Structure formats: C-alpha cells, structure tokens
Image (cartoon, helix red, strand yellow):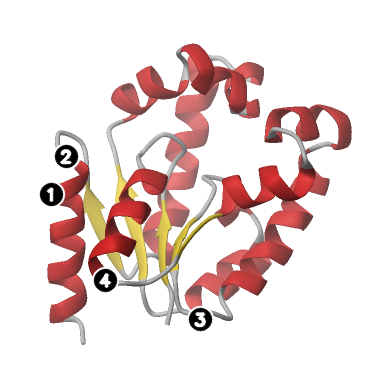
Amino acid sequence: MSIILIGFMGVGKSTVAKKLAEEVNLPVADMDDILTQQLGMIITDFFEMQGEAAFRTLETRLLVELLKTDQIIATGGGVIMNKENQEALQAQSKVIFLDGDFDLIYSRISSGRNAEIRPIVRQKSKESLKELFDYRQKIYQKLADYTLRVSGQYPREIVEEIIKWLEESK
C-alpha cells in the first residue's frame, strides 16, 4: 500500500516524503519531479504552452500508475482538483494531509526560484491564492485518513508523527 502525502504547494510534501521513505524503507515518488522529467520542461512552461487541463490529464495518468506500487508519493498541490484523482486517493488507506499555515506557505512559494517554478503563483495574487488555499483545504481534509499540522515543525518531527500514526493504524 502506498503512503500518499497531500497538501497545498509549499507545505513540505517533497521533503517529508524523502525523509519518510528513508525511515520506512520504501521508494519515493515525487509527482512534480517525475512530471518535469517526463515533460522535459518545468511545469510552469508546460502550463503556459498547453494549459492546466492538459497538465491535469498527465498528472492523473501518473497518479494511477504510481498507485500500483507500494511507495511514498508526494503529490502536487492540485492533484485533488480532479474527481478521478479524488476517487483513486479515497481507494487508498494511507492518505496523509500535511496541513500548514497559509502565511508561512505563501512566504515559501512566492520568493525566488519557488515562484518561478509554480505556475499558479505567477498567475494569482496573494488574496486569490488564499481563496484557493481555503477551497482546497476542505478537499484535502475530506480525502485524508490522517491530518497533521506541520507549521512550526521540522521535517524530522513530522516524519516521527507519521510513523507513530502508521504504527497505530495497523
């Protein structure tokens, strides 16, 4: 069974996935990294050339494929926007929502290289991103088997809490 990390962009899914994979001895799949490799370009460029709908189609195909293998999966923040993806995630029993504070997340995603590689950050104001954050939060919560507040915690602490939950939920 895969362990899937969901949450808004910039919450730390990729970092936590890598550290968690080391601890539980499973491979890690970072969906954004895989899609970037498959596309041969950063996601922002693909969004601008092909649009979000084309990206979401590729993202869905990848998610379905990744769920066939036991691994830690760091999803993209918008993976939950597709109904098919929601159904695929609900069929899994280890969906973990990394829930963070919007202002902290915004400071991470809006600066330097992070802003360049996140298409939605370049397109939306802080207020629009907050609305999107609030909207997605409800979906993340609905899909999650476990919700973990991550603001103010180090990745190591987050991984420890996830491992504790995994052991308790066996």
Q: Gap in Å between the C-alphas at discs 3 and 1?
A: 28 Å
Q: Does 158 appear above or below 48?
A: below
Residue found at x 65% / y 27%: 119
Q: Earlier in the sequence, mark 3 or mark 1?
A: 3
The nearer-to-camera label among 4 and 2 is 4
Q: Amino acid at mark 2?
A: Tyr
Q: Earlier in the sequence, mark 1 or mark 4?
A: 4
Q: Amino acid at mark 1?
A: Glu
Q: Which quadrant: the C terminus?
A: bottom left
Residue at mark 3: 91
Disc number placed over residue 24 in the picture, else none? 4
Q: Earlier in the sequence, mark 4 or mark 2?
A: 4
- Tags 1 and 4 touching, CB below 8 Å: no
Residue found at x 14% / y 60%: 161
Residue at mark 2: 154
Residue at mark 1: 157
